Image (cartoon, rainbow, N blue to C red):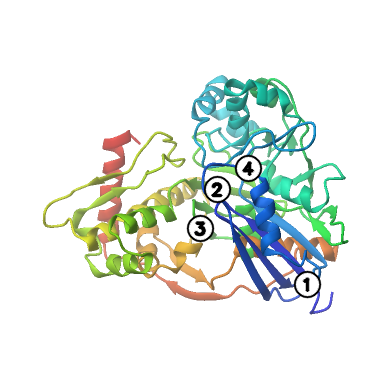
């Protein structure tokens, strides 16, 4: 490949579609574009296709290859005419929590962790299929094909003439693909859904999914967290903490993780290895909701959070505003504890939102460490990584060195790296340089331990976890 071979990467997230064009040899980002998605936990997938077209009006005319990375777990149900028969139920739609509990009870959490790699929660596709069968039987009966968001978008790009495809990283988040066995478990779909619809063929990480009608090569694509790991080029001992619409904590390991508690999901990554991951439903919106309450914008919330006492003067926010996935509390709600007339100030309320967000992610990081996974360095990414108050507190709350890479669309960049890999035909993905913007070390001052202790006590009092 020459230095000017161009590849493209797509990140179709909950909130928007982002597209990047990249120099395939150096990894330098040449252009970016974005288009918004509608809000909600159930969305007509055709909105994603329109957003993708809006942010790529040239139709990838200059790109030799492209790949799509997208939000995991979303259920895209298609009828006999290959059109959606129902709005796609997204990862943050918790209506299938009862079905998840039924599936866990049916087989037991240790069985799920051992045989599948994940223990069902309401995020996973299998639970959404079970909900559809029980609550919308006519829709379920009309469903002929089941895809994930990245599968559906890749198929649209290919013109829907060939059979749809997926990859191991995204399939591993469905609940009906066995990571240890590297294969679908159709009997689980049969039990949950009543029939087995057409499923996409699972491609190898560097395999191609076809070409666009204009001739651009399509790589396999991947789930969004696998895309971010690929875009960052994770190394041993490094863990990603990504704070966007959701919060995720993940790393890449050669061996799968088996966690019977279900806290750590044993997903696959986009390189043929594994991606143990924990996710929180509540992340950036914790700060957005607090800013709205205080009638300030996010930069002002950040300033307020940096202006008061580091421990929020005793305020503790348990920020489970929309239910939670880690811990598995789909019906939980947010709670503010420790209020007094003296400490109920805008500064302390802003700070409590930052600390509640970080404590929730620190609990997830500790669960990863409990699996014997090293977490010496945290790569902090996502929109909230730009927050000065979050950056400054993260090293102490997470008990790790924090490195903040230069702002970039790392999910889309990972998709572009996968596209360059498929284009090259090499055994390994291209090596692109990672650029670090700033870093922080823990201060060992002791205040963070007090904050985390208050957070732990609050969770136990409220939810017994």
Left or right: 416 as drawn, with respect to 90: right
In the picture, the disc for residue 312 is: none
| Mark 4 element type | loop
Q: In which quarter of the image is the N terminus?
A: bottom right
Vertical comparison of 408 with 209: above or below: below
- Alpha-carbon neighbours of circle 2 within 10 Å: few (<14), some, or many (≥20)? many
Residue 107: x and y in percent read 58, 22
Gap in Å between the C-alphas at discs 3 and 4?
A: 26 Å
Q: Which is nearer the N-term, disc 2 or disc 4?
A: 4
User: Which residue is the site of mark 1?
Assistant: 6
Q: Which is nearer the N-term, disc 2 or disc 3?
A: 3
Q: Which is nearer the N-term, disc 1 or disc 3?
A: 1
User: Which residue is the site of mark 2?
Assistant: 277
CB under 8 Å between discs 4 and 1? no
For the view shown, which residue lies furthest in the bottom direction?
Answer: 3
- Alpha-carbon neighbours of circle 4 within 10 Å: few (<14), some, or many (≥20)? some
Q: Which of the pair 66/417 is nearer the observer?
A: 66
State the residue at coordinates (26%, 36%): 461
State the residue at coordinates (61%, 49%): 71
User: Which residue is the site of mark 3?
Assistant: 242
Q: For residue 123, what is the image quadrant?
A: top right
Q: Which of the pair 204/414 is nearer the observer?
A: 414
CB under 8 Å between discs 3 and 4? no
Gap in Å between the C-alphas at discs 1 and 2?
A: 31 Å
Number of on-image labels:
4
Mark 2 or mark 3, whichever is nearer to me: 3
User: Which residue is the site of mark 4?
Assistant: 44
């Amino acid at each position: 490949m020459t230095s000017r071979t161009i590849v493209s990467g797509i990140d179709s997230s909950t909130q928007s579609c982002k597209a990047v064009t990249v120099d395939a040899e150096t990894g330098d980002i040449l252009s970016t574009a974005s288009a918004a998605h509608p809000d909600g936990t159930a969305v007509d997938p055709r909105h994603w296709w329109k957003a993708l077209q809006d942010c790529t009006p040239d139709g990838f005319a200059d790109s030799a290859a492209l790949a799509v990375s997208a939000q995991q777990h979303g259920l895209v149900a298609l009828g006999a005419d290959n059109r959606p028969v129902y709005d796609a139920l997204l990862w943050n739609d918790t209506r299938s929590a009862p079905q998840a509990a039924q599936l866990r009870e049916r087989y037991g959490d240790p069985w799920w962790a051992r045989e599948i790699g994940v223990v069902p929660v309401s995020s996973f596709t299998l639970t959404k299929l079970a909900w559809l069968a029980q609550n919308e039987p006519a829709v379920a009966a009309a469903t002929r094909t089941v895809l994930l968001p990245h599968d559906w978008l890749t198929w649209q790009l290919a013109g829907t003439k060939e059979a749809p495809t997926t990859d191991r990283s995204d399939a591993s988040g469905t609940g009906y693909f066995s990571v240890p066995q590297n294969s679908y478990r159709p009997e689980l779909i049969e039990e949950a859904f009543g029939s087995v619809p057409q499923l996409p063929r699972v491609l190898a990480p560097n395999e191609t999914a076809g070409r666009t009608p204009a001739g651009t090569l399509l790589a396999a694509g991947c789930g969004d967290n696998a895309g971010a790991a690929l875009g960052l080029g994770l190394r041993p001992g490094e863990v990603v903490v990504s704070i966007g619409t959701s919060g995720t904590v993940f790393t890449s390991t050669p061996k799968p993780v088996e966690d019977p508690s279900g806290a750590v999901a044993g997903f696959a990554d986009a390189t043929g290895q594994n991606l143990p991951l924990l996710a929180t439903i509540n992340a950036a919106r914790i700060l957005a909701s607090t800013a709205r309450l205080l009638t300030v914008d996010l930069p002002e919330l950040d300033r307020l959070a940096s202006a008061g006492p580091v421990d929020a003067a005793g305020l503790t926010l348990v920020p489970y505003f929309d239910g939670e996935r880690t811990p598995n509390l789909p019906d939980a709600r947010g709670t503010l504890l420790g209020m007094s007339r003296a400490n109920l100030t805008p500064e302390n309320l802003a700070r409590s939102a930052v600390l509640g967000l970080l404590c929730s992610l620190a609990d997830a990081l500790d669960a990863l460490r409990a699996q014997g996974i090293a977490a010496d360095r945290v790569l902090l990414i996502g929109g909230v990584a730009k927050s000065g108050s979050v950056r400054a507190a993260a090293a102490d709350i997470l008990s790790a060195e924090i490195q903040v890479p230069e702002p970039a669309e790392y999910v889309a960049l990972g998709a572009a790296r996968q596209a360059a890999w498929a284009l090259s035909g090499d055994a390994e993905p291209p090596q692109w340089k990672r650029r670090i913007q700033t870093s922080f070390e823990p201060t060992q001052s002791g205040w963070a331990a007090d904050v985390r202790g208050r957070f732990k006590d609050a969770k136990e009092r409220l939810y017994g976890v």
